[in-house]
Image (tube, grey):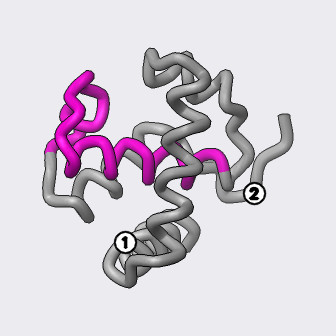
Amino acid sequence: MVRNTLEMKIENVDKEVAEAFGIKVTDIRKRNRRREFSDARQMAWMLLSDNGYSIMELSRAYRRNHSAVCKGIRRIKGLVEVHRKIDALYREIKEKLCC
Protein backbone atom coordinates (compact mmCIF):
# COMPACT_ATOMS: atom_id res chain seq x y z
CA MET A 1 0.00 0.00 0.00
CA VAL A 2 1.32 3.43 -0.97
CA ARG A 3 0.72 6.30 1.42
CA ASN A 4 1.79 9.94 1.44
CA THR A 5 5.49 10.56 2.00
CA LEU A 6 4.65 11.90 5.46
CA GLU A 7 2.98 8.71 6.61
CA MET A 8 0.46 9.16 9.36
CA LYS A 9 0.77 6.65 12.12
CA ILE A 10 -2.39 5.68 13.92
CA GLU A 11 -0.90 6.54 17.32
CA ASN A 12 0.07 10.04 16.16
CA VAL A 13 -3.37 10.69 14.73
CA ASP A 14 -5.06 9.45 17.91
CA LYS A 15 -2.84 11.74 19.99
CA GLU A 16 -3.54 14.85 17.91
CA VAL A 17 -7.27 14.17 17.70
CA ALA A 18 -7.54 13.54 21.43
CA GLU A 19 -5.67 16.78 22.14
CA ALA A 20 -7.92 18.77 19.78
CA PHE A 21 -11.10 17.30 21.29
CA GLY A 22 -9.85 17.64 24.88
CA ILE A 23 -10.08 13.95 25.72
CA LYS A 24 -7.61 11.18 26.55
CA VAL A 25 -6.09 9.00 23.84
CA THR A 26 -7.59 5.93 25.52
CA ASP A 27 -11.07 7.47 25.16
CA ILE A 28 -10.81 7.21 21.37
CA ARG A 29 -10.37 3.44 21.58
CA LYS A 30 -13.17 2.88 24.10
CA ARG A 31 -16.46 1.32 23.08
CA ASN A 32 -18.25 4.34 24.48
CA ARG A 33 -20.85 6.04 22.30
CA ARG A 34 -20.68 9.43 23.99
CA ARG A 35 -20.69 12.17 21.37
CA GLU A 36 -17.26 13.64 22.11
CA PHE A 37 -15.64 10.19 21.95
CA SER A 38 -17.42 9.04 18.81
CA ASP A 39 -16.76 12.33 16.99
CA ALA A 40 -13.07 12.10 17.87
CA ARG A 41 -12.85 8.45 16.84
CA GLN A 42 -14.59 9.15 13.54
CA MET A 43 -12.34 12.14 12.90
CA ALA A 44 -9.30 9.89 13.36
CA TRP A 45 -10.80 7.35 10.95
CA MET A 46 -11.42 10.03 8.34
CA LEU A 47 -7.90 11.46 8.63
CA LEU A 48 -6.37 8.01 8.30
CA SER A 49 -8.69 7.06 5.46
CA ASP A 50 -7.75 10.26 3.61
CA ASN A 51 -4.12 9.25 4.03
CA GLY A 52 -4.54 5.85 2.39
CA TYR A 53 -5.52 3.48 5.18
CA SER A 54 -8.15 0.98 4.08
CA ILE A 55 -11.41 0.41 5.90
CA MET A 56 -10.22 -3.08 6.82
CA GLU A 57 -6.97 -1.74 8.32
CA LEU A 58 -8.94 0.75 10.38
CA SER A 59 -11.49 -1.81 11.51
CA ARG A 60 -8.72 -4.12 12.70
CA ALA A 61 -6.78 -1.35 14.43
CA TYR A 62 -9.83 0.00 16.26
CA ARG A 63 -11.52 -3.38 16.76
CA ARG A 64 -14.70 -2.29 15.04
CA ASN A 65 -16.86 -3.79 12.33
CA HIS A 66 -15.93 -2.46 8.89
CA SER A 67 -19.46 -1.18 8.37
CA ALA A 68 -19.19 0.88 11.58
CA VAL A 69 -16.01 2.47 10.24
CA CYS A 70 -17.66 3.22 6.87
CA LYS A 71 -20.68 4.77 8.54
CA GLY A 72 -18.50 6.77 10.92
CA ILE A 73 -16.42 8.22 8.11
CA ARG A 74 -19.56 9.17 6.14
CA ARG A 75 -21.06 10.77 9.25
CA ILE A 76 -18.02 12.88 10.14
CA LYS A 77 -17.57 13.97 6.49
CA GLY A 78 -21.13 15.24 6.58
CA LEU A 79 -20.43 17.13 9.80
CA VAL A 80 -17.24 18.66 8.37
CA GLU A 81 -19.28 20.00 5.44
CA VAL A 82 -21.92 21.72 7.57
CA HIS A 83 -20.37 22.58 10.95
CA ARG A 84 -17.69 25.25 11.07
CA LYS A 85 -16.28 24.06 14.39
CA ILE A 86 -15.83 20.47 13.21
CA ASP A 87 -14.37 21.71 9.91
CA ALA A 88 -11.92 23.95 11.80
CA LEU A 89 -10.86 21.02 14.03
CA TYR A 90 -10.36 18.81 10.97
CA ARG A 91 -8.20 21.40 9.20
CA GLU A 92 -6.20 22.12 12.37
CA ILE A 93 -5.44 18.46 13.04
CA LYS A 94 -4.62 17.74 9.40
CA GLU A 95 -2.21 20.68 9.29
CA LYS A 96 -0.43 19.53 12.47
CA LEU A 97 -0.06 15.99 11.13
CA CYS A 98 1.11 16.93 7.65
CA CYS A 99 3.68 19.59 8.50
Which element type, helix, strand or loop, lies under badge 1?
helix
Q: What amino acid is at disc 2?
A: Thr
Q: Residues within 10 Å of mark 1 (few under 14, many from 20)?
A: many
Instruction: Specify whether 19 is left or right of 92.
Output: left
Residue span colored magenta = 24-49
Compared to residue 63, the image places residue 89 above or below, namely: below
Image quadrant holding the N terminus, namely: top right
In the rendered image, residue 33 lying in the magenta stretch gets the answer yes
Name above or below for residue 87 compared with residue 61.
below
Residue found at x 37% / y 71%: 86
Query: Which residue bears the numbered disc 2?
Result: 5
Q: Name the residue rendered at 67%, 31% in the picture.
A: 55
Say which amino acid is labelled 1.
Ile
Q: Say which residue label 1 marks.
A: 86
Q: Residue 44: percent from the left, percent from the top?
A: 45, 48
Magenta stretch: residue 87 in it? no
The residue lying at 55 percent from left, 54 percent from top is 47
Q: Compute the Cα span from label 1 to label 2.
A: 26 Å
Q: In this view of the protein, which residue sits in the foreground, 92 or 4?
A: 92
Q: Position of residue 76 (x, y in %)?
A: 47, 56
Eye-nearest disc, 1 or 2: 1
